[in-house]
Each structure stands twice: as C-alpha cells, then as structure tokens.
Image: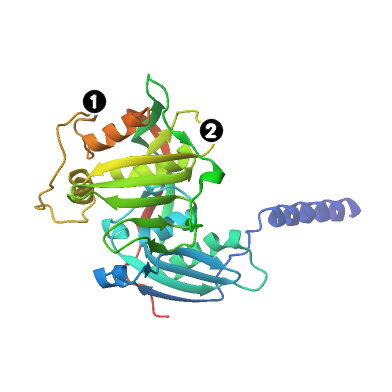
Amino acid sequence: MSKRISSAVACLALTAGACFAQAPKPRLEFEVASVKVAELPTPAMVASGKLHAGVKVDNARVDIGLTAMLGLVQKAFDVKQYQISGPDWMLTTPYDIVAKMPEGSTKDQMPQMLLSLLEDRFGLKYHREKKEQSVYALVVDKGGSKLEPFKAEGEANGAVTGSNEIAISGKPGQSQTVSDGTGLQQTVTPSPDGKSLHIAFRKVPVTMLCDGLFRFVGRPIVDLTELKGDYNAALDISMADIIAMQKSLGLVPGGAAPTGGGADTRPADMASDSFGSSVVESLKKLGLKLESRKTPVDMIIIDKLEKNPTAN
C-alpha cells in the first residue's frame, strides 16, 4: 500500500513539475491605448516645421505617430521589413497610437505590448516560417572602401539626436534632416533641377546603411563588407529610380512617368531589378557594390489583419 502511495506522490510531483516548467509567460499589455488611422501629411504640415512621426517612449507613455502598419509589425516582432509578408495596405496606411504602459514596465517590454495591441485591436493572426529569398550582398569593391569614418568632434551644432520626429532644417522645400528614432540619421536635399535627391547619412554602421538602402532596392541587403565602426556616407538617387521603386510598391499610379535618370549601368544580373543606375553609381563612389544572392530568411507571415482598429 505504501509503495502505491509513494508511486502516486512521485507521479504527481513529476506532473506538477512538468506543468510548472511549461507555464506560459504572462501576456504583456498596455494599460490603456488610443488607436486611430493617421492623417496623411499635407505640404502645409511639412512647411510648419515638424511632423508628428516615429516612435517615442517617455517613461510609461508611448507615442507612435504617422507609422505604417508594416512599421508597427516590424517594431512588435523586432525584425526587418523584408521579413514580413502581408497585404499591400500595410505599407501605405499610417496610424497614430498613444498608450500607457503599466507601472514598473520597462522600455524593452514595449514591443511585446504592441504585439498584444495588434492582436486585440486589429485581429492579428500570424505564423513563422523560413523562406528562400533573393537578397543583395553589400561587398567592398575591388578598389577598396571609400567610406568616411565618423569623428565625434566633427558633429555640427543642432545635430539630430533621435527625437523620433521629422524636423525641417533650412527653408521648406530645401534640406530635410530626418531621424526615425532608430539611430539612422540622414539629411535629404533635392537637386536644383528636382531630378534627384542627395541623401547624406551620418554616424551609421554599415549594417544600418543597408537598412537605409533597402527602401531604394526593394530587396533585403546583407552586409558582407566586414567594415566595423561608424561612417558618414552620401547617396545621389535619381527621382526616376525613386518613382520606379514607389510604383513597384504601389505608392504611385502605374501610369506615372518617371523623369530624370540616365543610362542603365547596372550589372547584367541586376538588369531586371526595380532600382536604377543611380544607386549603383552612388555605391561605386563609396567603394561598395551589390551582388545578387539567395538565402533562407526567417519570415513573419500575416494570416489575418484588419485595416480598421476596434473602437477605443
């Protein structure tokens, strides 16, 4: 009899231990949150000097402005944009979110709370899988890197410090200094003829430069340069290439005719890609180049996602 009791107790102990080991982590949620579709910026809003955009966490307060659903999902899962597969509107519909985190929460817990909000307010359903994708490898060209190492003493007064806002420097229509809160700082200056943009990156590692290039090439970029440290870099991108990229993403009508540009100097294996010669030429001046590759990529596949959130 005692042996049976001992066996039963041992069995219960093992079962309890297994249940305890498999106990799920508590779900993290915002204490309260206001969600709405954001108003698209007008020229007047831009001319006023500031746009409410990006992600800002100030103690328990979370303020997200003018951020597309793709950016929200990216933040929630802490992945790159190209690791997300979902409906096209995720890229073109922006949202404003103001939320309060529970007392004692940390900034690092915010993405998990954002994921809970997407599940509760937008009905997000997803799964993970690995897919082979076409990517670009960023490599050093045969002549060597010409990137300029960043020097702290060379910083200009009034430099952007990651305010999570888009600030206009100079007169409207001229240079725009942009910080998106991720540390990627860039100044965008239209050419006098309006046919290209001069984009200057400051204090960026090459991996972050790859993130900045992604929007122009529409394909994941893997850093294989082996370059360490922070750099200053500049790209001159033609409006033709920018419009072509926007068209491929559905951001402008398919009939829009790009202007500017020049002869196609892309390598043969890139001839069918959506970006043009200005990207290739800009990288060449930096002593860098892109090579087509294929590699497995961990993906977040969106199975269900509502465009309009449930009521606040």
Side of 58 where 296 appears, left or right:
left
Mark 1–mark 2 CB contact (< 8 Å): no
Q: Amino acid at mark 2?
A: Lys
> How was this image coloured?
rainbow
Q: Check disc 1 and give the amino acid type.
A: Pro
Q: Nearer the viewer, residue 116 or 152?
A: 152
Residue to which mark 1 is pinned? 267
Q: Which residue is situated farthest in the bottom direction here? A: 312
Residue in view at x 37 percent, y 31 percent: 286
Q: Quadrant of residue 35?
A: bottom left
Quadrant showing the C terminus: bottom left
- Depth check, mark 1 against mark 2: the one in front is 2
Label 1, residues with CA under 10 Å away: few <14, some 14-19, many ≥20: few
Give the image location of residue 137, x and y in percent. 38, 30
Mark 1 → mark 2, Cα distance in angstroms: 27 Å
Compare residues 184 and 193 and report the one nearer the observer: 193
- Mark 2 nearby-residue class (10 Å; few <14, some 14–19, many ≥20): few
The outermost residue toward the right is 2
- State the residue at coordinates (75%, 54%): 17
Taking the image as shown, residue 311 lies to the left or right of residue 227, namely left
User: x, y percentage for residue 199?
Assistant: 33, 46
Q: Nearer the viewer, residue 254 or 225?
A: 225
Residue under label 2, please give it: 228
Secondary structure state at the residue bearing disc 2: loop
Numbered label attached to residue 134: none
What residue is shown at x 16% (from left), y 31% (from top)?
Answer: 264
Foreground: 93 or 215? 215
Q: Residue at x 33, y 52 (%)?
A: 188
First reached walking from the N terminus: tag 1 or tag 2: 2
**Coordinates of residue 149 in the picture (x, y in percent):** 50, 35
- In this picture, residue 167 sits left or right of residue 113: left
Check the image and report above or below for 211 versus 262.
Answer: below
